[in-house]
Amino acid sequence: MRSNVLRHNLLTALLLGPATAWLVVFLVLPFVAIAVFSVGQRAPEGGYQAAFTLAQYVNLPARATAFWNTMVLAPAGALASLLVAYPVAYYLALRAPERWRLILLALVVIPFWTSLLMRTYAWMYILGGSGIPALLAYGGFEDVRLINTPGAVLLGIVYGYLPLMILPIYVSLERLDRRLLEASADLGATPVSTFLGVTLRLSLPGVMTGFSLVMILLLGEYLIPTLLGGGKVFFIGNALVDLFLQSRNWPFGSAIAITLVLVSVVVLLAANRISTRLSGARRVDLI
Amino acid sequence: MRAFVVAVFAFLYLPIALVVLFSFNAGRHASELTGFSVQWYGKALSNPFLVEALKNSLFIATTSALLAALCGTAAALGLARVGARTRAIFDALLGAAIVVPGVVIGISTLVALVQLFGIVNPFLASLWPNDQPPRLALGYGSIIAAHGLFSMALVAMIVGTRLGSLDRNLVEASSDLYATPLTTFRSIVLPQIMPAVIAGFLLAFTFSFDDFIVAFFVAGAQTTLPIYVFASIRRGVTPEINAIATIVLVASVLLVVLAQWQLRQRKPSN
């Protein structure tokens, strides 16, 4: 009997071993490393010098513009995505004909798994000098500037993250008990109050999941502001690339990265709190 | 509402369609279609740097997806055998590997590996006093490992979900009929989770093949296709990029469709 238990435990350890090693070496240790770096100092020639100081954190306002842009455009982008995504998710979950549903859902998922670089590039091409502005010039509107503006970045954000917003909302709407909608109508509620009191309320966990996922990914976004903002719209992601790959101030960069992770955790916890308060927790399927 | 949904789908697909269309444009400019031509594909594929980057990306994506599929599946199977507390810790770590933004994964891996190499390389040098000592550096290995982290977590989640919906009765029936645990695994469990494993592999491949930001930090002297494309875009938009983008988009779409199709295979009817 004991050898059986031993064999069971050994097999479990063998199955979990590689994943554990991977998670420890490439997730936990790197996180510890940037945490240690963030309380260190910049070595004179760049890189890291051991120390214990909060100077890097005190210095965070030096990158206030990047924080400001991110903190304004990330929630704005997530909100804009939400406004576009909700009707689509609603239609897919409650209105679409049965045989179309899976195909339409697949059409939402496909862009999510398609290269963000290439999809952002598509907009660079469309908004750039020889795209829409050139077409407008034919129509007599000269010098219309579309690319390298905050508007272009916002458009790129909605385009890039729309699928990620639609999916969790779809999941929560699809699981909604249809009898509740009938009950609400039978009890004399207008369609609007049924929507507000039942549908919207019960889909809020999906809304919160989508909103927080998009927010968190946007906090670290680099490609969209770089390609569509043209160096004029600077995000935290741009600051991190600059500090790690160009000016080589690793301790300061680490402090920014740690701050980013902390903000993400706060966003996740807040979203979780709101959705569990409103109804039971839901998990997301990304496929 | 229907019109709005149609408009959103057009919004999602028109930009991609335009890039594909203009990759076959004979002319140089985005503002005018001057005729059909595949010259930009020829130009792209005769560019040695580009072909090199493409090969690197294919190698990295294949290796990291294979490793991720193996380790992720093993982890999902292992997690079905442990207590609730261990499971919760693992789930949190796997969730973190998926949710933490790529830019943070990239820089933290860079920082950790550079420190690690700083310790290991002098040690290796002391072991090989005469010849060229082996030197650890950023490159294929670090990109594969960093991509594999996300992918492994993804596979573990997809396969874990599938394991959760596995029909327990079949497993019990199998062992009641005196099948060994190995036979039960091979003939009951494995066929049921295989579509999830394949889907996980395909998505892992797609992720690695498309990723820019993680590789950007940990690639060292290597170039992947997205890194190459990013660098060329910044130098200026050229029609060759449309051709490459089309190839990458078509490849990703095929892989994702295949993955979705696998996941819908033999799915329990409820």
Image: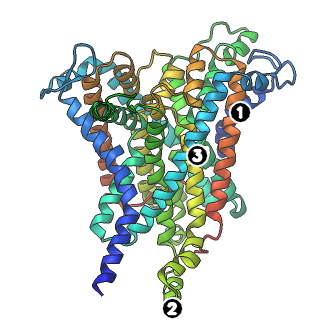
Q: Which residue is mark 1?
A: B246
Q: Quadrant of the C terminus of chain A?
A: bottom right
> In screen coordinates, is A74 left or right of B183?
left
SS for dot 2: loop
Rendered image coloring scheme: rainbow
Measuring 50% from the left and 58% from the top, which residue is drawn there? B70
> In screen coordinates, is A53 left or right of A209?
left
> In screen coordinates, is B115 left or right of A103?
left
**Alpha carbon separation for disc pair 2 and 3:** 39 Å
Position in image of residue B44 (x %, y %): 72, 24
Position in image of residue A274 (x %, y %): 32, 53
Of the residues under marks 1 and 2, which one precedes in the sequence? 2
Which corner quadrant of the image does residue A127 belong to? top right
Q: Which residue is mark 2?
A: B178
Mark count: 3
Of the residues under marks 2 and 3, which one precedes in the sequence? 3
SS for dot 1: helix
Q: Is residue B169 above or below residue A126?
A: below
SS for dot 3: helix
- Identified by mark 2, the residue type is Tyr
Q: Can the viewer see residue A96 in this picture? A: no
Label 1 environment density (alpha carbons within 10 Å; few <14, some 14–19, many ≥20): many
Q: Nearer the viewer, residue B31 or B131?
A: B131
Q: Which residue is mark 3?
A: B62
Residue farthest along the bottom direction in this orientation: B177
**Alpha carbon separation for disc pair 3 and 1:** 20 Å
Q: Quadrant of the N terminus of chain A?
A: bottom left
**Alpha carbon separation for disc pair 1 and 2:** 54 Å
